[in-house]
Image: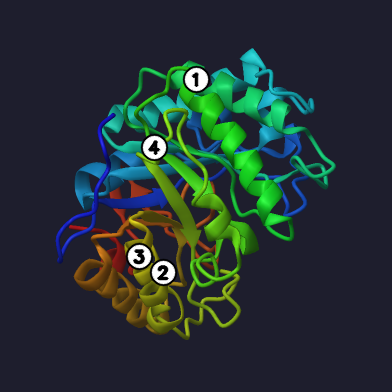
Amino acid sequence: MPTTTGTGPGALKFYGVNIPGFDFGCDTDGDCTEAGAYPPLTQYYGADGAGQMTHFYNDDGYNMFRLPVGWQFLTNNAETGVLNTTTLAEYNILVQDCLATGAYCIIDIHNYARFNGSIIGQGGPSNEIFAELWSNIASYYASESKIVFGVMNEPHDLNVTLWAGTVQAAVTAIRNAGATTQMILLPGDNYTSAATIWSDGSGAALLLVTNPDGTTTNLIFDVHKYLDSDNSGTSDVCVTDNVSEAWEPLAAWLRENGRLALNTETGGGNTASCVQYMCQQISYMKANASDVILGYVGWAAGNFATTYVLSETPTDTDGVWTDTELVMDCMAPK
C-alpha cells in the first residue's frame, strides 16, 4: 500500500478548497434533507463548481477539493446504506469534475455523526448501516486513486470510545470494498477541533483504528480550525493564528504517535485581520509542521455567494476568474 507522507520544511502536500452545495440543508443534528441540497453545478442551476475547481487547480495551484454531501441526499432520505442511483449520479457529476482537474477529491459525509438527530452507533443508525454506506461508496470509487474518504464531518457530543468503533467499521468496510490504498480521514469529537483532538480522548481512541491488515497506512487524522473568537467560522474578524493553542501541540502529538493530519476546514473573512492571521497560520504549517500536517482545505467556495462571510468563491467575468482577497493574499499556493 503506498504510504502518504509529509513534506520537508517550506511546503505542504495539499492545498485545497471546499466546494459545498450537496450538503446544503444539513444542520449539526444531522438533519439533512435531500430537497435542501443545492448542487454546485450549472446543469442544476447552481454555481459553476467545475469551473471553480478548474480555475483553482490551473491558475492558483490548488490540488485538493472537498465535496460535502448529506447522507440523506445519497440515499434519498432513507436511513440506509443503500445508495440511490439517481442522487448518486448527480453527486458523481461533481466528483468526476473534480477528478478531471487532476486534483485529489474528498468525499465528505456532512452529518455531524448523526442521522436526523440520532448519533450513529449510539442510538441512531447502527454501525452496520454506516459501514454499508461506506462500503457502497468505496466500491463505486475503488479504482480512483485520488479519491479520499472523509468518514464524517464534525462529530460532536458523543462517546469517543464508541465513536472509534463506528469509525473502525467504516474503515474496514472501505478497505474490504476494494479501496485498499486511498487515504481515509478519521474525525474526532468536538467538531474535529485541532485544538482538542490530542487532549479530549478522541485522538487516543482513534489511534486504535486500523486497516484490516493491522496497519495504519493512509489513515489520516481529520481536523478543523477557524480563526474567529469562538472557532465557529461565523465571523470575518480573526483573532488568532492558532499556533500555540492548536498547531504546535497537535504537531507534537502527531510526531509522538507517528501519525499525520489534514486540516479539511479552515477559513476567515476577506478582511485585514483574517489575512494577517491566516497567513501566519499557513506560514507556521509550512515551516514547522509540514512533516505531520499534510495541508489545508479552505472553507468555502461552491454554492456560497460572494457575500458569504467566509467566501472563497471566485468571480467569473466572461471566463476570467478573480479570487477573493483571502485566497489571493494567503491561501492560494501559487
Amino acid under label 3?
A: Glu
Mark before the other along the chain sequence, 1 or 2? 1
User: For mark 2, what is the residue?
Assistant: 250
Amino acid under label 4?
A: Thr
SS category of the residue bearing label 2 = helix
Do labels 1 and 2 touch, CB within 8 Å?
A: no
Compute the Cα span from label 1 to label 2. 30 Å
Disc 3 crowd, CA 10 A, few/some/many (<14, 14-19, 20+): few
Amino acid under label 2?
A: Leu
Q: Is residue 23 visible?
A: no
Q: Is residue 295 left or right of residue 219?
A: left
Q: Is residue 102 left or right of residue 82?
A: left
The structure residue drawn at horizontal position 49% and vertical position 32%, both measured from the top left corner, is 42
User: For mark 3, what is the residue?
Assistant: 256
The structure residue drawn at horizontal position 29% and vertical position 47%, both measured from the top left corner, is 56
Picture disc at residue 176: 1
Amino acid under label 1?
A: Asn
* Quadrant (top left, top right, bottom left, bottom right) of the C terminus: bottom left
Q: Of the residues tagged 2 and 4, which is closer to the observer? A: 4
User: For mark 4, what is the residue?
Assistant: 215
Do labels 3 and 1 touch, CB within 8 Å?
A: no
Disc 4 crowd, CA 10 A, few/some/many (<14, 14-19, 20+): few
Q: Is residue 326 left or right of residue 230?
A: left
158 or 72: nearer the eye?
Answer: 158
Compute the Cα span from label 3 to label 1. 29 Å
